[in-house]
Image (cartoon, rainbow, N blue to C red):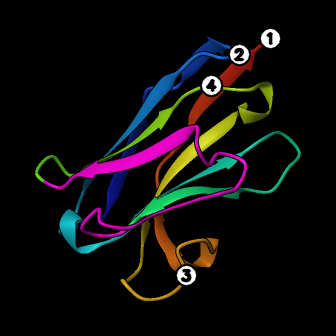
Amino acid sequence: QVQLVETGGGLVQAGGSLRLSCAASGRTFSNYPMGWFRQAPGKEREFVAAISWSGGATYYADSVKGRFTISRDNAKATVYLQMNNLKREDTAVYYCAQKRQHSGSYYARPEYGYWGQGTQVTVSS
């Protein structure tokens, strides 16, 4: 059974930085693409970033491009989300997710079969 555990959330001032981590277990981590999504109060869960199984390809939502960086360490079975120049609108619960398979969209929620419990990120002005 796949388990994904996010850490690193917290309260930060606008313009600050945070790094989220997601430790995975249960399937061969290096075989599967990974993604980060977020959900703000009253809004739907939205795509933030994704990374291919090798780390050779990355994908970002327009709203975070140039500020967030996704990376992975297959030896540690961990995916990261470095968030810089945070804005109030980045406030949300952030979820780590693992794709069901290599093929298919990196942006679509249904493509991800496994989810973490989420970690809160709050950006204050």
Q: Amino acid at mark 3?
A: Ser
Residue range highlighted in magenta: 52-74
Of labels 3 and 1, earlier in sequence is 3
Residue under numbered circle 2 = 14
* Mark 2 nearby-residue class (10 Å; few <14, some 14–19, many ≥20): some
Report which quarter residue 103 is drawn in: bottom left
The CA distance from mark 2 to mark 3 is: 31 Å
Q: Are marks 2 and 1 in contact (CB under 8 Å)?
A: yes
- Identify the mark nearer the N-term, 1 or 4: 4
* Magenta residue check for 41: no
Alpha carbons under labels 3 and 1: distance apart = 35 Å
With respect to residue 67, does 113 lie above or below? below
Residues at circles 3 and 4 in contact by the CB criterion of under 8 Å: no
Mark 1: which secondary structure? loop
Q: Position of residue 105 (x, y in %)?
A: 55, 81
Q: Residue at x 31, y 63 (%)?
A: 2
The amino acid pointed to by label 4 is Asn
Left-right relation of 76 to 98: left
The image quadrant where one finds the C terminus is top right
Q: Secondary structure at mark 2?
A: loop
Against 56, residue 67 (above or below) is above
In the rendered image, the vertical position of residue 99 relative to residue 92, given as above or below: below
Other residues around mark 1 within 10 Å, as few (<14) / some (14–19) / many (≥20): few
Q: Which mark is residue 105?
A: 3
Residue at 65% from the left image edge and 45% from the top image edge: 64
Query: Where is residue 67 shown, x and y percent of the image?
Result: 58, 37
Residue that mark 4 sits on = 85
**Mark 3 crowdedness (10 Å alpha carbons): few <14, some 14-19, many ≥20:** few
The residue that mark 1 highlights is 125
Quadrant that contains the N terminus: bottom left
